[in-house]
Image (cartoon, grey):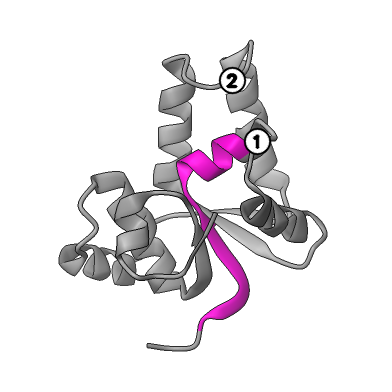
Amino acid sequence: MAPLAANLYVSDTVALARYLEDDLPKKANEVFEMAEAGKATILVPDIVIAEFIYIGLKGRLKFSDPRAIIGELLSDLQSSPYLLPVGVSSEAWNIYIDSMVPELHDRLIYSVALASKVAAIITNDPGIIASGYPTIW
């Protein structure tokens, strides 16, 4: 495996939601703060954006106006210097095929992280943690 990019991370949906709710645990929050300071980049896979929108529309976010926060996130993703939306590359799809991460969304997040050679995945998901890939929470 190629060396990991020291200041490149992938966020899962829970981490992104809790970041926007200002409710992350210390270590995960430190990564987002590094990114805000221009010292790191956080990749946000398309599946994370889709899942965030889905849970927002289902009323499972801690915001009084979920549609507004969804719109704000989509706008921020277009202009943010530290949150970078990413699709699933051919390499990530090949990783996905052989991945042992059981759940569909988490498997895609893991595959994007592995293909992108990020330093860690910002997650508390047991399936991703069990993969052995570096995680931060």
Q: Residue at x 31, y 72 (%)?
A: 91
Mark 2 or 1: in front is 1
Question: Can residue 88 be seen?
Answer: no
Question: Can residue 93 be seen?
Answer: yes
Residue type, mark 2 in image = Lys
Q: Nearer the viewer, residue 56 or 129?
A: 129
Residue contact at pointers 2 and 1, CB within 8 angstroms: yes
Direction right: furthest residue: 37
Q: Residue at x 30, y 62 (%)?
A: 130
Give the Cα distance between marks 2 and 1: 10 Å
Q: Is residue 117 left or right of residue 28?
A: left
Which mark identifies residue 62?
A: 2
Q: Magenta segment: does it hold 16?
A: yes
Where does the magenta region start and end?
4-18
Circle 1: element type: loop
Which mark identifies residue 23?
A: 1
Direction front: furthest residue: 26
Vertical comparison of 106 with 55: above or below: below
Direction bottom: furthest residue: 2
Which mark identifies residue 106?
A: none
Q: Is residue 107 left or right of residue 23?
A: left
Q: Position of residue 81 (x, y in %)?
A: 74, 56
Q: Residue at x 66, y 63 (%)?
A: 41
Residue type, mark 1 in image = Asp
Q: Position of residue 116 (x, y in %)?
A: 46, 71
Q: Magenta segment: does it hold 14?
A: yes
Circle 2: element type: loop
